[in-house]
Image (cartoon, rainbow, N blue to C red):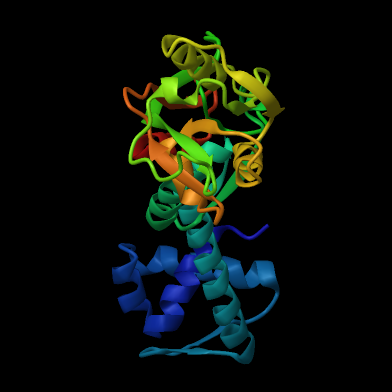
Amino acid sequence: MIDVKPLRYFVTLAETRHFGRAAARLNLSQPPLSRQLAALEASLGVTLIERSPRSVTLTAAGERFYADAKAILSAIEQAARNAQAAAHGDTGTLAIGFTMCAAYSVVPSYARTFGSAYPEVALNLREVVSNDLAAQVLAGQIDAAIMFPGAPNRSLAMRTIVSEPLCVALSRTHPRARARQLKIAQLAGEPFVLASEEVAPTLRATILEHCRSGGFEPDIRFEVQLQQTVLSLVDEGVGVALVPASMRKAQLAGVVFRPLADAPTIEQVLVWSPVNRNPCLERFLELA
């Protein structure tokens, strides 16, 4: 295998066409440079340069070798830059899982900001049912997750990134759809659409507790997995729902969102494994 150093020597000589100038550029004396290039020719079995007292001329083989050697050196330099970028998280792959609520809150802005700061990183965004997210982080299937808080896990790190109030989602034809604001007691007796406990236990517990603070137990007619499904059922007029305020961005034609007096807040957290050494994750955590 050819040593890279003789390639650099040869390319410098080909560009200066003079042993003295090439040696000066390389911080060498002429004899070592001449010996290196003679050894290179011997290893290739071809004559690369024609020597004269005042200048150097490349042979046909030398011209070809000069073009190839220059491309090789350029590729090596690019490989070094690529390795350094990967080590610093400037390039690579990052997988982020998230719930549907996060798709309407922070995911779009995170994608825009991170994509702008690190355009060479392939950002893989995966919408996942929330009860699977922590397990996927632990299994290394994704690098981080944006989700509702769950039971504490000592193997995972967690940071709150969103705190927003709940609001009321009603069918546009609902008698209370024109109210500017609703109190939770006004929803007593209404059929409710909720996310299942398995999928979003924290969100569900917050909703149930707030209903009880209003003096009633909610009449849960439908339990579903996705917030989009919750809104689709509200759109059909089969029930009302309490949803994070960011779900207003869903903009279903038949659904209106009304502020809830004394609304409880619901958090979304960023979860990752401290043992994950993906440098792209470090860059994402800095931005998040």
Return the x and y of residue 47 as percentages of the image width and height.
Answer: 62, 82
Of 123 and 75, nearer the camera is 123
- The answer to whether 164 is drawn above or below residue 60 in the figure is above
Return the x and y of residue 53 as percentages of the image width and height.
Answer: 38, 88
| Image quadrant in which the C terminus is located | top left
Q: Is residue 265 left or right of residue 147?
A: left
- The answer to whether 169 is drawn above or below residue 134 in the figure is below
- The answer to whether 92 is drawn above or below residue 24 in the figure is above
Q: Is residue 256 left or right of residue 38?
A: left
Return the x and y of residue 137 as percentages of the image width and height.
Answer: 61, 26
Residue at the front extreme of this rendering: 175
| Residue at x 40% of width, y 85% of height | 17
| Residue at x 68% of width, y 71% of height | 44
Q: Quadrant of residue 97?
A: top right
Of 72 and 178, nearer the camera is 178
| Residue at x 56% of width, y 12% of height | 217
Q: Is residue 283 visible?
A: no
| Residue at x 40% of width, y 45% of height | 178
Q: Is residue 243 visible?
A: yes
Q: Quadrant of residue 95?
A: top right
Return the x and y of residue 9 as percentages of the image width and height.
Answer: 46, 68
Report how many numbered discs are placed on residues in the image: 0
Of 123 and 185, nearer the camera is 185
| Image quadrant in which the N terminus is located | bottom right
